[in-house]
Image (cartoon, rainbow, N blue to C red):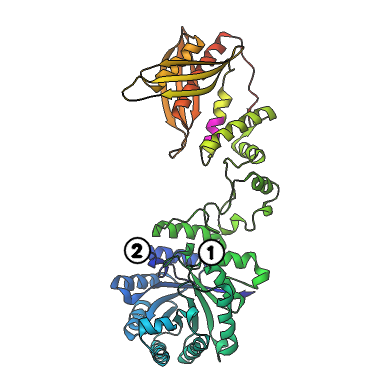
């Protein structure tokens, strides 16, 4: 297959993202990971921009050994001199010179005619040739440049000594058909085009950066420029990981692939996110937290039967251990049963039905149900005593200048559903008093404790109570996203245990540990 070279500009275009400011050490750390990823070319920065940027490019050039290190420069001698100062000790240095060519840039930014643009670029490339064996030239805003003039610019760059000509869709204006046609036209009409590499640099302003880059590949591009996680100016750049996996997954269509070590993608993504402070969206292709997560019951069922039903890429390919079956309100029984097996619980049908109903109730109140949530829910059920009293509902009226009042509804064995109301020193005391009134059990509360089972505002709370009745004591446990409900559940559980101690041993629970 034809090799597509990867030009990574995370350290230059990516750092231009608003709010991102990498120091030298961070740039070197990312560059070394990019080298490990197998990136062919690393654009380390813009040396003429500041003494700090020059020093950072120097540090990257000294650290990187197997990839070409590139410095950006405008088509002026002082920028080229700064680039050479930064890169002269690099194992494989390259300069990237750019000059705008579109009518809007020529008129409003450069205030140049076509002839002046050609002459300026020619002079800059020839000057850089004194120092660099590898020169990339970019006609900035090439996507909005007249095709005949773009052909003329490309021919000039080849004659002046450029080894790579990059075609930037600087403002993300192109569609795949239009952008692909640029490469096709250049390939067919520019003398000497076979002696250089054509590169594609796309921005994502209209959400088409990856599609445009792949259209360029289909029409003869040799190199794709982009960033890790697609970070960059405005809406960002082509996401390198997206191009790499598209070529890997659809190899028969594109007839090309990168030389990247794909298993390093997840690690590289995490590093760039951490050091830039730019969080990767959950729905981001390839590297988003949800890229290999499935919550829909239909999808989970398909995944459990055959992964390729809903996954075209294996998570192991990019360095992730496995897919995630996210437990939420859309999850089905099949996925729920498999998750419980993974956690070490085998449930018979009746117990599974009860646990699944309890899970669905929890999922309606909690966005993501974690393994810890499930364990807390199951352990509460495992430890439950025979239910003489089963809590149905609770209701609390509370104000800081009024007496708290609690109402509980309990299903009493042999008597049906009953409701009682009581006041108390606080909301929990009111609920406990209401339960005492309904059950007529004379008990003392010896201990009460609460802890968070999981994290976040919707975390499960776990309440433990110890009740005494004469010489007997019993501990109760309750779990809920609402601490008042958890408290009531724990109190009722302790009551049931006290009653169980007065009777013969009750039935064994049908749940069992594996």
Q: Residue furthest left?
A: 51
The mark found on residue 241 in the picture is: 1
Q: Quadrant of residue 381?
A: top right
Stretch in magenta = 373-377
Magenta-drawn stretch contains 374: yes
Q: Is residue 3 visible?
A: no
Q: Residue at x 53, y 81 (%)?
A: 198
The mark found on residue 194 in the picture is: none
The mark found on residue 21 in the picture is: 2
Q: Position of residue 66 (x, y in %)?
A: 48, 72
Which secondary structure lies at badge 1?
helix
Q: Residues within 10 Å of mark 1 (few under 14, many from 20)?
A: many
Q: 117 or 319: which is nearer to us? A: 117
Q: Is residue 64 above or below residue 431?
A: below
Magenta-drawn stretch contains 129: no
Q: Main secondary structure of the magenta part?
A: helix
Q: Quadrant of the C terminus?
A: top right
Q: Quadrant of the N terminus?
A: bottom right
Q: Residue at x 34, y 70 (%)?
A: 56
Q: Residue at x 32, y 77 (%)?
A: 48
Q: CA distance from mark 1 to mark 2?
A: 22 Å
Which secondary structure lies at badge 2?
loop
Q: Position of residue 406 (x, y in %)?
A: 43, 20
Left or right: 54 in relation to 160 = left
């Amino acid at each position: 297959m034809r090799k597509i070279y990867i030009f990574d500009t995370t350290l230059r275009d990516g750092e231009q993202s608003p709010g991102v400011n990498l120091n030298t050490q961070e740039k070197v750390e990312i560059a070394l990971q990019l080298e490990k990823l197998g990136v062919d070319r690393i654009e380390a920065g813009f040396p003429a921009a500041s003494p700090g940027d020059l020093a950072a490019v120097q540090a990257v050039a000294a650290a990187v050994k197997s990839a070409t290190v590139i410095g950006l420069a405008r088509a002026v001698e002082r920028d080229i001199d700064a680039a050479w100062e930064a890169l002269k000790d690099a194992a494989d240095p390259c300069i990237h010179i750019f000059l705008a060519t579109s009518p809007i840039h020529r008129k409003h930014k450069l205030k140049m005619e076509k002839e002046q643009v050609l002459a300026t670029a020619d002079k800059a490339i020839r000057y850089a040739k004194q120092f660099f064996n590898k020169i990339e030239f970019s006609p900035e805003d090439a996507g909005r440049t007249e095709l005949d003039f773009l052909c003329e610019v490309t021919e000039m760059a080849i004659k002046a000594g450029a080894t790579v000509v990059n075609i930037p869709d600087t403002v993300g204006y192109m569609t795949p058909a239009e952008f692909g046609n640029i490469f096709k036209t250049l390939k067919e009409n520019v003398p000497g085009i076979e002696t250089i590499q054509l590169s594609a640099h796309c921005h994502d302003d209209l959400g088409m950066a990856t599609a445009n880059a792949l259209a360029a590949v289909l029409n003869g591009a040799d190199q794709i420029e982009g960033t890790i996680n697609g970070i960059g100016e405005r809406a960002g750049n082509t996401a390198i990981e997206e191009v790499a996996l598209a070529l890997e997954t659809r190899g028969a269509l594109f007839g090309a692939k990168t030389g990247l070590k794909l298993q390093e993608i997840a690690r590289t993504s995490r590093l760039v996110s951490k050091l830039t402070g730019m969080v990767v969206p959950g729905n981001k292709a390839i590297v988003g937290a949800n890229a290999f997560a499935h919550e829909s019951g239909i999808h989970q069922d398909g995944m459990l039967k055959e992964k390729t039903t809903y996954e075209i890429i294996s998570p192991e390919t990019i360095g992730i251990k496995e897919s995630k079956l996210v437990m939420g309100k859309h999850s089905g029984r099949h996925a729920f049963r498999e998750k419980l097996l993974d956690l070490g619980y085998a449930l018979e049908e009746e117990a599974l039905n009860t646990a699944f109903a309890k899970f669905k109730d929890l999922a309606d109140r909690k966005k993501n149900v974690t393994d810890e949530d499930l364990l807390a829910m199951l352990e509460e059920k495992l430890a439950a005593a025979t239910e003489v009293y089963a809590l149905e509902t609770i209701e609390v009226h509370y104000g800081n200048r009024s007496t708290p009042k609690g109402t509980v509804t309990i299903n009493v064995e042999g008597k049906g559903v009953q409701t009682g109301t009581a006041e108390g020193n606080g909301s929990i005391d009111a609920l406990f008093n209401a339960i005492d009134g309904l059950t007529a059990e004379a008990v003392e509360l010896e201990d009460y404790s609460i802890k968070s089972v999981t994290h976040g505002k919707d975390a499960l709370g776990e309440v433990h109570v110890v009740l005494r009745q004469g010489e007997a004591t019993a501990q109760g446990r309750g779990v809920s996203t609402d601490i008042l409900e958890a408290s009531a559940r724990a109190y009722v559980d302790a009551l049931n245990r006290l009653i169980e101690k007065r009777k013969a041993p009750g039935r064994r629970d049908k749940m069992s540990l594996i």
